[in-house]
Image (tube, rainbow, N blue to C red):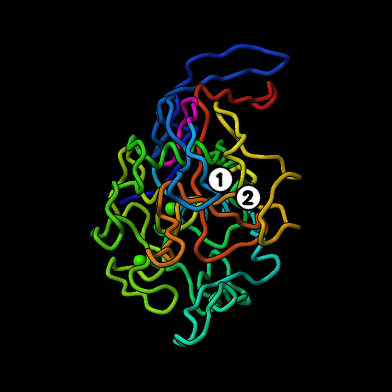
């Protein structure tokens, strides 16, 4: 399915122009290309049956917003880079993290350091490393992007990153209280509902969904709100700073996460983390199960990997400012 362009400004309809403080304010509210309008509503965020950072399940009100139907693709990102000359952080430091299955040794206690490898010259154009490329993969989600890389792209197309609450509300697709976007059936009982890991992680990927790494965006069925890969394929940056106990005290309307200084990942308490959501092609029933719709993950905003990407959002009745001189 095509995810070819999200340059929405050109197709928006102007619904009002006013002059404020020397600026012409152009108000637009038509349907942006490849985005879905999520009506304002209430839902139960988190889970009392999930990981501790998903406790407690609690009511949240979310204002209406737009969100991309698809993860941002290599083609989208290539357009951004071609026009702006943007250089990602991984390209600047000339390395990035790439997953590789460790040696099959069932007597060994495996941890993330056994399967994440810092690979020289791995970047968004070279997902597995310098010998790999994105030829034939322009419809796949862009990877090896840091939080700032993702935000730079979204800002370029006049958008922002979704909040964690917006992402979960959208991901649930109207299925209140269910474990997955597709219902309550465990992944291994479902057929190609999303791009994940089948078999025992991290040693044995059965690839019964057809993809060992990323799949083209939109290859798998949309959720109830028409959003593709909102779980699975790649993890997605959201705008919140992460704290495992945030839900115990978060506001009930439009929560936006803790402050940077209050962010906490107990495994790396000295490093402020953002949240990522939705799980990836590396998530399995036996390991992170990040495709559960309430699942959260802390991530270093300055670290890129080959299983993390993003999609963008925008507010309703977006007010776009143009200086009088630019019109
Ligand atoms: Ca897969
Ligand atoms: Ca995803």
- Give coordinates of residue 120: x percent, y percent: 63, 77
In this orientation, which residue lies closer to the viewer: 33 or 273? Answer: 273
Quick check: 132 above or below 253? below
Task: Please state the extent of the stretch shown in magenta in the rendering.
Answer: 59-68
- Crowd around label 2: few <14 · some 14–19 · many ≥20 (10 Å): many
Screen quadrant of the C terminus: top right
Count of labels in the image: 2
Of 91 and 325, the residue lying toward us:
91
> Do tag 2 and tag 1 residues touch (Cβ < 8 Å)?
yes
Residue 7 in view (yes/no): no
Using residue 308 as the reference point, say whether residue 35 is left or right of it.
left
Q: Is residue 255 visible?
A: yes
Residue under the point 42% across and 63% down: 283
The residue tagged 1 is: 238
SS class, disc 2: strand
Viewer-nearest residue: 246 or 291: 246
Report crowding for label 1: few under 14, some 14 to 19, many 20 or more residues within 10 A (C-alpha).
many
Q: Position of residue 77 (x, y in %)?
A: 52, 53
Q: Taking 143 as reference, is 5 above or below it?
A: above
Secondary element at tag 1: strand
Residue 266 sits in quarter:
bottom right
Task: Please check the rendered image and state whether residue 64 is part of the magenta-colored stretch, yes or no.
Answer: yes
Distance from the alpha carbon under mark 2 to that under mark 1: 7 Å
Asked whether, in this view, residue 155 is left or right of residue 284, the answer is: right
Residue drawn at the location 73% of the way across and 14% of the way down: 21
Residue denoted by label 2: 274
Task: Say if the magenta span includes residue 53.
Answer: no
Q: Is 298 rendered above or below residue 208? A: above
Relative placement, left or right, of 322 versus 307 is: right
Residue 55 is marked as none
Q: Residue 244's x, y, as percent? A: 61, 48
């Amino acid at each position: 399915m095509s995810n070819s362009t999200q340059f929405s400004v050109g197709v928006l309809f102007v619904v009002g122009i006013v002059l404020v403080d020397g600026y012409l304010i152009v108000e637009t509210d038509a349907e942006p290309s490849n985005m879905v309008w999520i009506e304002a509503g209430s839902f139960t965020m988190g889970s009392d049956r999930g990981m501790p950072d998903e406790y407690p399940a609690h009511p949240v009100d979310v204002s209406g917003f737009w969100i991309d139907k698809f993860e941002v693709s290599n083609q989208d990102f290539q357009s951004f880079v071609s026009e702006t000359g943007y250089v990602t952080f991984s390209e600047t430091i000339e390395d990035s993290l790439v997953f590789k299955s460790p040696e099959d040794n069932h007597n060994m206690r495996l941890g993330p350091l056994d399967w994440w490898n810092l690979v020289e010259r791995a970047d968004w154009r070279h997902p597995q490393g310098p010998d790999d490329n994105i030829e034939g993969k322009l419809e796949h989600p862009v990877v090896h992007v840091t939080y700032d890389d993702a935000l730079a792209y979204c800002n370029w197309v006049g958008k922002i990153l979704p909040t964690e609450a917006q992402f979960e509300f959208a991901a649930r697709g109207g299925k209140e209280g269910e474990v997955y976007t597709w219902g309550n059936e465990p992944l291994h009982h479902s057929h190609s509902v999303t791009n994940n890991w089948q078999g025992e992680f991290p040693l044995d990927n059965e690839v019964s969904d057809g993809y060992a790494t990323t799949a083209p965006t939109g290859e798998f069925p949309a959720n109830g709100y028409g959003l593709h890969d909102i779980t699975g394929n790649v993890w997605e940056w959201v705008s919140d700073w992460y704290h495992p106990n945030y839900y115990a005290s978060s506001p009930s309307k439009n929560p936006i996460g803790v402050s940077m200084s209050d962010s906490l990942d107990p495994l790396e308490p000295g490093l402020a983390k953002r949240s990522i959501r939705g799980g990836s092609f590396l998530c399995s029933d036996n390991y992170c199960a990040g495709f559960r719709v309430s699942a959260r993950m802390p991530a270093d905003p300055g670290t890129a990997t080959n299983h993390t990407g993003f999609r963008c959002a925008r507010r309703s009745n977006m007010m776009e400012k143009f200086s009088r001189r630019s019109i």
